[in-house]
Every structure is written in C-alpha cells, then in structure tokens.
Amino acid sequence: MAVKNAEEYISVHRHWEKELRQLHEMILSTDLKPEIKWGAPVYTFNDKNVVGIGAFKNHVGIWFFNGALLKENTALLVNAQEGKTKALRQIRFEKGDEIKTSALLPYIKEAIQNQREGKEIKPVRIKKVVISEELAEAFLNDPGLKKSFDKLTPGKQGEYADYITEAKRPATKSSRIEKISPMIKKGTGLHDKYKNC
C-alpha cells in the first residue's frame, strides 16, 4: 500500500507508532519539510534529502542521507550497509529503547547546517555491470527478460548481476535466476521490498 504522507505511514506501522511519532514530531520542530519517498517519510531542506525515518521488523531507524559528513555528532551513527553506502548513516532503536530527542536534535541540526552550506558526498560512478554466463543465457532463452533488464536503472541492473555472480554453485545461480526473473519483468529492484517495510 502506497502511503500519501508521514501521518499515514505512522498509522500503518502500529507496532512502532509511538517511536515514529516521536521522531516525526522532533524533526518537524526543525526547518525540514516532510515528504514521502521510497514509501517512507523523508525530510528535505531546499528540496534536498536530509533525514528519513522508517519502521522495520526489529527496529525503527532515522537515517541521514549525508551522515558521513557529520563531524560533531557521530557516536550513535552506524553504516547500514558497510562497503555499499558512502554517505548514508543511521541510528536504530529497538522496542523499549528510549528515544532522547535532546540527544538526536544536534545530529539533525548539524545535518541541516551541512545542507545549508551545500556539503554533500557525490555518488561514485556506478561500476560497469558484468553479466555472468548464466544470466546471459537466461536473456537468450527469454528476450522479454533481457528487454525488462535493459529498462532497469544501472544500480538495479548491478544488484541483480552481482546477486547471480556471487553464487558459487551453478544450481544456486539457476535458482536465483528463476527467483529474480519475475522481479526483473515487474521492473522492481532486488532490494526494493526492504525500502518499503
């Protein structure tokens, strides 16, 4: 279900409603504007993404789009995808954790100040997508699959290509191709389902 605004997102995630509301209201006390991007609340300054919040199975997170640039407020930050994300950092809360807005606000204010000053980490050029023999063969056997793959963004193409290449055994590669083919044809990315939870 696509949510229209932050309030709707919070009400849909009842298990984390209290925590999400606390984070949302704290962020609204700043100069940031709430929007919905990738199915979750993202807060922008001059149309640039600064922070976002999200509910997952075991935690609630607040992420900083250029969190790697934070210098003064870093103690709580973690890199959600070590080796994959250069700029993104997040702070996670599990059920029962106290969310101290007095501790979090300085992080948000520093992130806003960085955005005001135009500081950002530029994305690294996406590496060339390397198609494995198995995936190339699947494209030959199903031209519709190849056509759908070509319509994906380079990032999504890379995720799928790496997913197949990382498998060691031919049987695993075959089962992975079988699993991802409908997703490719739908135009979804390998990790899209995690972006909307």
Image (cartoon, rainbow, N blue to C red):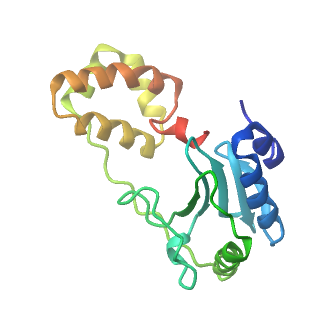
Q: Is residue 97 left or right of residue 10?
A: left
Check the image and name the residue furthest to the left.
169
Q: Is residue 189 above or below residue 121?
A: above
Q: Nearer the viewer, residue 24 or 160?
A: 24
Q: Is residue 34 left or right of residue 52?
A: right
Q: Position of residue 157 (x, y in %)?
A: 40, 39
* Residue 70, picture quadrant: bottom right
129 and 191: which is toward the camera: 191
Up/down of 45 relative to 196, above or below? below
Q: How many numbered dots are placed on residues in this image?
A: 0
Task: Indicate the quadrant where residue 14 lies.
Answer: top right
Q: Residue shown at 73%/63% (left/top)?
A: 44
Can you give x and y, in whole percent of width and height, for residue 52 in the image? 66, 58
The quarter of the image holding the N terminus is: top right
Residue at the far top: name it.
141
Furthest residue in direction front, as rendered: 96
Q: Is residue 139 visible?
A: no
106 w.r.t. 57: above or below: below
Residue 187 in sight: yes
Which sits in the foreground, 65 or 16?
A: 16
Which is nearer the eye, 175 or 23? 23
Q: Is residue 145 left or right of residue 100?
A: left
On the image, the x and y values in percent for residue 87 come to 49, 67
Q: Is residue 45 above or below residue 95?
A: below
Q: Position of residue 177 (x, y in %)?
A: 32, 23
Quadrant placement of the C terminus = top right
Give left or right: position of 114 versus 43. Answer: left
